[in-house]
Image (cartoon, coloured by chain):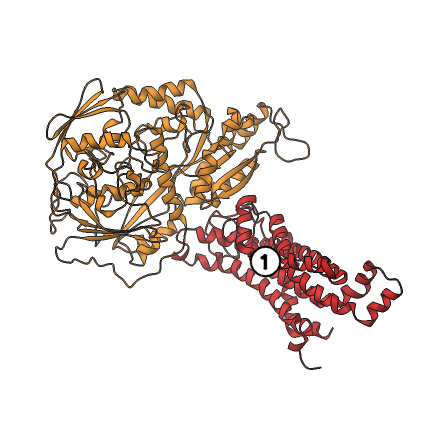
Chain colours: A red, B orange
Amino acid sequence: MRTLRSPLIVAGGGLLVAAAVVAILAPALAPYHPRALVGLPLQRPSAAHLLGTNDIGQDIFSQVIWGTRPSLTVAVGASALAVFTGVLVGVGAGLAGGRADSLAMRVVDLFLALPVLPLLVLIAALAGASRLVIILVIGLIRWPEIARVTRGQTRTLRHRGFVGAAQGFGAGVPYLLRRHLVPALGPVIAAGVVSVATIAVLMEAGLAFLGLADPTVVSWGLMLNRALLFPGLYYSALWTWWVLPAGLAISVVVLGLTFVGVGLEPTFNPRLGPRR
Amino acid sequence: MTVPTTGAHQMDRRRFLTATLGAAGALALGACTDADQRAAPGATTGRPRLRIGAPQDFGFPSPFSYLAGPGYTRMSYLYDTLLWKDSSGELLPWLARTYQGSDDGLTYTFELREASWSDGRPVTADDVAFTFEYFAAQTISPLVLAQPRYVAAVEATGERSVRFTLDTPAVTFPEAVAGAIPIVPRHVWSSIDDPGAAQDPEVLVGSGPYRVESYQAGTGAYLFTAREDYFLGPPFVERLEIRGVGNELNALLGGEIDGGLSTVTGVQPVALRPFRADPSFGIIEDTGGFAIPLYFNLARGGALADVRFRQACALAIDRSELVDRLLGGNGIPGNPGYLAPNHPFHVDVEQYPFDPAAANRLLDEAGYVRPGGGGPRQGPDGAPLRFGVSVLNTIPAVVELVVGSLVAVGVELVPQLLSLPALLGARSRGDYEMTVNFDGGVGGDPDSMRATYSSTVGGTFSAGGYADPELDELATRQLVTQDEAERRQLIGRMQGIVARDVPLLPLYYPTLYFAFDERVFDQWYFTPGSAGASGPFPYNKQALITGRQTGVDIRAVNESE
């Protein structure tokens, strides 16, 4: 538990909590509906429009605030799916051992070899890039690394005395999972969440940036996509309030996740940690 | 103002071409800047040397393998046509010295000038006859826009006189055939079986003003140098380089090129600001060469095939606001009659002025009711008014405005952004409900209306599934009539019909801008209705050859224009 107080985790967690609060309170925080035509196009920042207006007269500040939602939704959804699948397969394989274990690990190897971005671009182009598709694809592609680590941990734990003792007293797999394995796997799972969430945020923005996202959703990636398609973007100061805020918002969330991830690293890999 | 519509399919291809260019041009960003190279390298003759940009490769510049309109332009620097347009929009005698059509419109005779191929041999009437025989005998890619139509026979009646016989009178023949088909030498092509595949520079023997020194497939870089033995005299611009650049205006600003085109889907005034601010730049503009229409796929039936639904959509979309918001005023609101208000054949038709209340009433009357719990209206058969709309991915903002306008009257659109090839593919398969993309054929000869609306033509840019017998008949009659006043009247009636039926709704006509360094060359113009099959672009060789905007007299280097 000591690691949770590391400055990195506190800082990263703070950023993420702030982003989550913004996402939840978006309707209250944003001065306008993010899609409403609330002003003339291409207005400079002013009291009425803190970050000015975009090419058709929507409030950019409101869009930045609302853009938090798709980013975090995808991050949470994809990492939940990846962790659920990964832990299930990892723990199952670790406990079962033998052929089932080898088979599961070969499947894991197969998935680990899949390139995420090209696959996502392909799927998005063919099936459309709704948020659900992105969550499913990232979740289903990134579970193997979690499976591999949890399997390793499970195999170690299996041979520990307390697990053997519980089994000796007749504990079943669900009980073992709940009482002994999942708690012990906590840090591993947390690290997995951070890793998948980071990828999910970047992929969501990246696909939107490439123009492959649902164009009716307000997201940071789509804001960048729209801005960069605008002819003459750099002929005035326009980009400083249209491009920079969305880019910074993506950076802040990824930075928060990265801080937490790096902060968790010592638990994950004790050799990196301070000497006890 | 007429355009090379040698037929429906051809029109289609031309638009494909302009479409291709537009999409690539709309890819923003780009262009690192060399050191300032803007001053014209005067070199030896003092004649200008020009650099222009292009967003992509438009193919090997032979008459049988170029790609789309910009490819045609490059080819036109190497090959001549019998007639050619200058900035007045009138056809000048070009390879032909004179020409004459018969009263019944079925026969045309041409007398050729004394001209030579770039290998020194003379251009003869036999080459002209061979050109048309050869085109007729080959299978050529549809992206090669200029292909003969209406021609039944071509006969060399002397060393330099040639007679065309048409299978039907076609009012567009001088422009779409004589003014668009490049004449090729028999001694080069007669031994070539697959002309599209002949891409050896050796085959590029033309009568045109330039030779191609180099062509780089992939990047779209071309280098043309003047033929000092050109039949009109040594061309004024002695060297023309086409460079592959991402964004032409950025490249122009960076000094990489001497003239650059704005994106064909339109730009806000801010995109022109640097060029307006610097007096060394000139800007020319053209509105009405491109339209951004909203297409309905009538073949899908249901509400899409219901004229009241489409009229209600027209009432619900504020097309003036689209121009104001998307283009900052740099364009013209769409006209349901298809032709832009500045088109010479335009007539006033029903406009469906913005009126959401009237749109709601029309939908109510047509039996599309709003369900109690909200959501889109439902048709008499219970089907919701919910449609997919595929939109070119370089213009995402327009769909947002259209979606918002239609939601307000109870019509729900589900947008999908597609790349140009994907969008055109979906269109040609009929795999769409509604689409928004651009049409580069709207500004030329009004025969474009036949290609777009006649059910006897069909094609990628046609109004999907629309069929009106009266319109079909008018479309055929305007092509064969030799009476200008009658043609004008027929085309006026066609506009009235399509405005009534709204099989597609032009949303706006964006203004296209070409900015250029005046110190290097300042005679650029947009050819009214397109030069040959080039499309609505400013690279007419007439200006490059003569250094003037009209005629065939070549300007001296120190002469002002």
Q: Chain of mark 1?
A: A
Residue of label 1: A201
As drawn, the residue found furthest toward the front would be A99
B542 lies left or right of A38: left
As drawn, the residue found furthest toward the right would be A169
The image shows residue A48 at horizontal and vertical percentages of 53, 54
The image shows residue B380 at horizontal and vertical percentages of 62, 24
Residue B454: quarter of image: top left
The image shows residue B131 at horizontal and vertical percentages of 22, 33
Q: Quick one: B448 or B460, which is closer to the camera?
A: B460
Q: Quick one: B157 or B5, which is closer to the camera?
A: B157
Q: Quick one: B58 or A219, which is closer to the camera?
A: B58
B208 lies left or right of B147: left
Work out which quarter of the rendered image holds the N terminus of chain A and state it. bottom right
Work out which quarter of the rendered image holds the C terminus of chain A and state it. bottom right
Q: How many marks?
A: 1
Q: Quick one: B5 or B250, which is closer to the camera?
A: B5
Secondary-structure class at tag 1: helix
Task: Look at the image and tell me whether residue A105 can be seen.
Answer: yes
Q: Residue at x 28, y 55 (%)?
A: B257
Q: Residue at x 11, y 52 (%)?
A: B558
The image shows residue A146 at horizontal and vertical percentages of 67, 62
Q: Residue at x 16, y 35 (%)?
A: B95
Residue A154: quarter of image: bottom right
- Residue B27 higher or lower than B460, as above or below: below
